[in-house]
Image (cartoon, rainbow, N blue to C red):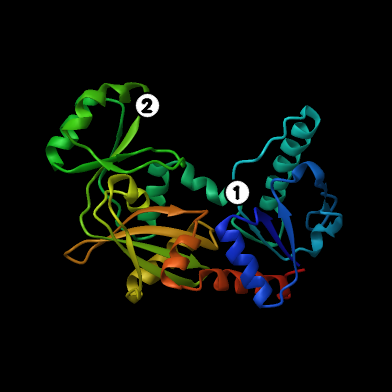
Amino acid sequence: MILVFGRPDDPPIALLLAALQQRNAGYAFIDDRHLAYTSLSLDLDGGPVGGRLRAAGEDIELRAIGSVYARLLNVVIPADPGQASHVQAFHALFTQWLDLTPALVVNRPWAMASNASKPYQAQLIAAAGLEVPETLVSNDPEEIEAFHGRHGHIVFKSISGVRSVVAEFGSQHAGRLPLVRSLPTQFQVAIRGADVRVHVVEGRTFATEITCEADDYRYATRSGAEAQLRGITLDSDIRDACIRLARSLDLPLCGIDLRRTPDGRWVCFEANPMPAYSYYEEHTGADISGALASLLLDAAHSPDGQ
């Protein structure tokens, strides 16, 4: 059995459900907004972790689940204290089960945790053989000014997994630089070139080149810019490096942010463990959801699956 956890109006979930339906795949779906009416119990007595899940009036034996796709977004906490306590307890137990079950999980919470620290993840990216930008993490304005002086063009972003807008550091930011004393910030040498997002679905890659004048194409409209996306084919060396990185992070689904420089270098900024792949699929037609559905279906029907 395949288990899908999330919200039906969340675009990545909607695309996956459509892909599963096209394949006539049986699946169970948990809407994370209705957790007050969902229950979970675990059985840890010998063998693979078992237990029961009850959702939408259906009882599911956990050992019958062979694969899971879980979009762990912000939990909606009900106003009722009793329901709120139930939802929080369910979410905590469900998250633990995702790390314990022998089923294929896309992606396990412990594996996604590497993205909670950008500097730590950068070390893992480098260890996988991809180049990363020269980086400074600091709360010292003088140290940051010296880094800026050495390199001329630098960008800054948060060091946590919380999404932040990447911007180039300039004179307009100088007056706010003392604020970093209370919030260490990551600064990197600005890398010029073309943005490329690579989605890895197990051993398959889907690459999208993004052309945009904004520092951060995800927020292009804020500066009046426009992002143009097109699918591209990767050379085997960078394709293999992306697959190697995703596997080293134990992420069956991974969104890798790269930049290809004018002189042909590839620089990696981040590996996103919960990518909103729908944005890229809808612009390029890349069948990422189909590859994900096939991965889940194969795992559910494999000899090791349930």
Q: Position of residue 127 (x, y in %)?
A: 38, 55
The front one of 296 and 102 is: 296
| Residue 65 against residue 302 in the figure, above or below | above
Q: Outermost residue, front direction?
A: 224
The front one of 263 and 54 is: 54
Q: Residue at x 74, y 46 (%)?
A: 34
User: How many numbered markers are drawn?
Assistant: 2
Left or right relative to 27: residue 12: left
Q: Residue at x 32, y 75 (%)?
A: 235
- On the image, which quarter does residue 291 sit in? bottom right
Q: Quadrant of the C terminus?
A: bottom right
Q: Which kind of residue does numbered mark 1 sit on?
A: Pro
The front one of 90 and 245 is: 90
Please give the label number shown on residue 109.
1
> Callout 1: few (<14), some (14-19), or many (20+) C-alpha neighbours within 10 Å?
some
Left or right relative to 163: residue 17: right
Q: Position of residue 40 (x, y in %)?
A: 81, 47
SS label for mark 2: loop
Q: Position of residue 63 (x, y in %)?
A: 80, 61
Q: Which kind of residue does numbered mark 2 sit on?
A: Leu
- On the image, which quarter does residue 151 sit in? top left
Q: Earlier in the sequence, mark 2 or mark 1?
A: 1
Left or right relative to 82: residue 2: left
Which residue corresponds to mark 2?
A: 183
